[in-house]
Amino acid sequence: MDISIDTLRQNARRVVDDARNQYISPYEEWTSDELRDLLVQYKIPIRDSSNASHEMLVRICDTVFGSEIAESEKDSIRRYSLEDLVRMEAAVRVIQKAFFQRQVLKRQRYYHHQNQQHHYHEDEYMDYDCEEGTDHDCQSADGDGYPNEAFRRATHTRQSILRRINEQGDDYDEEIEVEWRKPSWKFAKKTEAANRPHRSGKKMTPYDWTRVTLGRHCYAGGCGEQLDLWNEGRTSEFSQFGSGITNYFKFLKWCSWVMSILSVLHSPILFINTFGTNDKISLSVSAAMTTFGNLGSATNGSVDIPGCDETEFQFEHCEIEKNKLAVMYAYIDVIGTVFFIFAWLWLRSFEAKESRVLNRSTVTASDYTIRLTSVPEDTTEKDLAIHFAESTGEAVAAVHLAFNNSKEIDMYVQRGKVMQQRHKCVQRIRYEKTMIKENRGQRKRLRKLMREREDLTLLVRQKDEKRSKVVNQRQKAIQAFITFETEAGFVAAMTQYHLSWFRTHCCCYPERLKFKGTRLDIEQAPEPSTIIWENLEYSSKGRFFRKCLTTSVALLAILFSVLFTFLARDFKSKVLENASMPCPAGFFDQDPEYQLELVKNNLDLSHCYCSTLGAMEQWNINQCHDHLITSSKATATSYGAGFIVVFMNVFFTWLMDRAGVFEKHQSLDKMETSNMVRVFLLKFVNTGCLVLLYGQTWLQELVGIRFDDALDFNVDWYATGGTSLMIVMLMNIVAPHVGSFITYFRHRTKIRRLERNLTADKETKDSHRVWHTQEDLNDFYKGPPFRLNYRYSQVLVTLYVCWMYAVSMPLMPIFGAVSCYLSYWVDKFLFCNFYRTPPMYSDDMGKRCTSLLGFLVILHLGMSLWMMGCEEIFQGTPLSGEQYPEDLRKGIRASSFEEKLFKKHLFPLELTLMVFVVGMLLSRVSSTFLRKICGCLRCLICSKGNTLKNLKNNMNTVQVDYSSARDREIIKGLSSYNILQNPKYQEAFAITPEFAVNHNRVTSIRGYNTKEGDLIAQTY
């Protein structure tokens, strides 16, 4: 490279000029220590500043600060004289000497204490074996009173574990030397706000249950806006908790509206039944006045029209024939059924829309994640990430594996319980050392707490050694969760692996999609907060076997419920046996004095006279004493039977809760959906079907109780079974909420008592109660979990029972409307003020509940045919128009099944039932047939069908990367499929969130130390 002479001259001239005008930094006079202090003062970190040269420090300060800072800071630098430096050095040596002496004394006290503990435990073992043990244990000791070889081995094992604990030295001892910190009430309140449902944002503003709007299933415009009487709209403010929660509250609103409208439609039946002709029922049992039983037997050919007056309205007759009344009842029921069917179809449509809308507007971790239901045993996270990145062309954000480690997780849960006990023990020791003056009582308590701490430490170590035998076994990967960086990656994976059954299991499976030569089966991952990790290794066959066992136990519980109710029914029948004699003709037309004379002559007729009197009037008449006692026993038995049903419903809830855990479901959604269906069936049979079984001879022989009861819905059935059923449903309006409200008021009472005793600085008073740990104070403010499955099951039972008997007992729809309305407001209030934030429930439970309503239509029409086909109340006329003979029309005619089918008043119900069943079958068959045809066509042409279109339609409206959404905290629910980041498992394992962020395997949890009140898990 040639350089010109002019360039060389210019460079030389520049060097000479720089030498003449050399810049001298103002920091040249500063020492290195002064420069370091200046950098520290302005919080400018310099790596390895102690080894930096003076020239480098000067250059850094000159570049960063300039000359202005040098002039101003130079005057403020303190100059130490030689005498000051000598005094500072002497002070440092005194402090250092005192520290060394303190450490030596502490170590001596520690080893002295450990030696005492070893002697104490040896004596304890000796006393237990030779004083409290059995004779065989004492005889197994040596002749000199020493323990036998087995005891020596156990003692040696214990001492070896204690020796390993003691080898930790200061680390083990320093945890109790930390100053005790008083739990913060303000932090507990923040924890309460964070764990309770609240609005989005850092302020965690709680919901106002009187103003929060939960939306409803309606159209957004047009007629939908006109019908929105309370301006609720479609959007629910609970949408951040998932479609499961929003659909539940909208379902309660739907139930309230539907049952209210059905109550109005059935109001004519209610009025006519109430003013019927059966004097016996109307006078003795008030609840049965509203049923078919109050119309009397078929011998009463007509019924009075309520409110009709022949003289005032100039009507020829104020009566209606029963056959015409039956036809009117049938058409009213058909109108109500048609309305229910349309409302049901409306609900199905809008629940699907609700799920799609929330999926597009809510960002969750499952939007980016797929689940592999089976993977090779030697799979690693890196291998899966590379495979899916290459096959889809999209970045993979995270991969989490699930292993066959259910036993290990259970052991960690047991270990976590001991860790929590040990943490509380350490905190109590810190409290005694910090807050209590040293005296004899304090030393005694400390010795007891130190022994407890050592025993808990030993127990943790034993559990670790027991767990190590399981951990050391080779764990196999069984499932995997792959989270993509974008939703497009999730859609690409679901589209590529969504193949037909033929291509997946037979042939034509693309080789590039195989992982280690294995065909993969993928699905969209459930929400991370709903996964039950310890159950993932259980197969579907094992879960089916467990479900069969729990179902058998449930059936046995139903049998016990039948036995209890039959005993109550038998007792009531015996009590009312004397009151079964019919009253003489024209008895009620006589004056009371004459009636009383008849009763005095024949006490078996006391029910005819005494039932017209009040309780006090019956008590004042000697002839009515027995009747009053008898009727009181009968009423108490009816209510007692009702309480038995309510109690058994609570028992079924508890039983299915335990059964759900035993059945090992893989996700909370599946477990609670299964529990919801079975709890509903058990409660429905126990609540609404037992009254139908009283007259079944085979069941009477099974339970060993025989009594005469109606096989059909006659007048006597409504006086006994129908009345008991209405009492049960009346109690069910309030009974499901009593326990929740009692728990809520007790919880609020404890909190108010605590907050009344706060100090001026908003801290708790030790005179009221000493909170040793922050966790205990946090738990004090926690509410119970919000269990969605039991709420759905209770609402389903109410709908089924109330609508099933609606035509003959028109009070039932009213009970159903009141129950659903009350459930809506109670659950809304407790959700906002009491319950913890629920997991992100999917809409599976709501869809299953809605599908069950289709069977309710069939059940309702079948029960209406059965109840209105009872010839003891409605004789009816055939469709041909022929009249029965006069003697048969006045009596009770037992028609054959074929004759009942072709009665005029039953035909509208039969036609409605047939149309509905045929429509449902055609819909199901046609949809299945079309799906099979389309599947075959897609297989032939290798098409994806509508899968890609449906997935894209469910993508979020605003696209955001997974990492960005996680960092900005816009993901609703948990953002990671790391088991350790699930708060449920963090609490169970006794680990901190900080530890969970840096680890993703349960095998990472080690150690048993606590530090500053936080449960810390250490690693080797």
Image (cartoon, grey):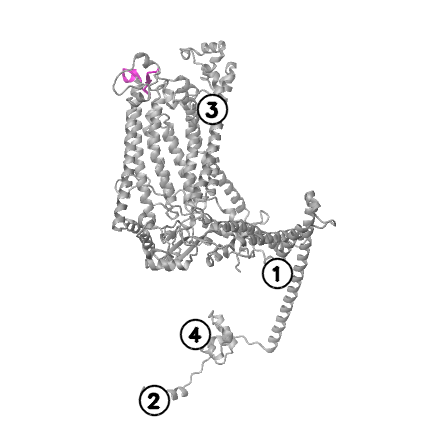
Q: Nearer the viewer, residue 306 or 899?
A: 899
Q: What range of the chain is rendered magenta? A: 299-317
Q: Where in the figure is residue 27, as x and y percent of width and height?
A: 47, 79
N-terminal of the pair, mark 3 or mark 1, is 1
Residue 349's disc is: none
On residue 701, which mark appears?
Answer: 3
Q: In this view, does 634 lie above or below 793?
A: above
Query: SS of the residue at dot 1?
Result: loop
Mark 3 vs mark 1, foreground winner is 3
Mark sitting earlier along the chain (1/2): 2
Q: Earlier in the sequence, mark 1 or mark 4?
A: 4
Q: Given the image, on which type of amino acid does mark 4 rest?
A: Val
| CA distance for labels 4 and 2 | 34 Å
Q: Which residue corresponds to mark 2?
A: 8
| Residue 519 vs residue 703, the one in the foreground | 519
Q: Mark 1: give few (<14), some (14-19) or many (20+) Cα within 10 Å.
A: few
Residue 436 in the image, given as x and y percentages of width and height: 63, 53
The tag on residue 64 is 4
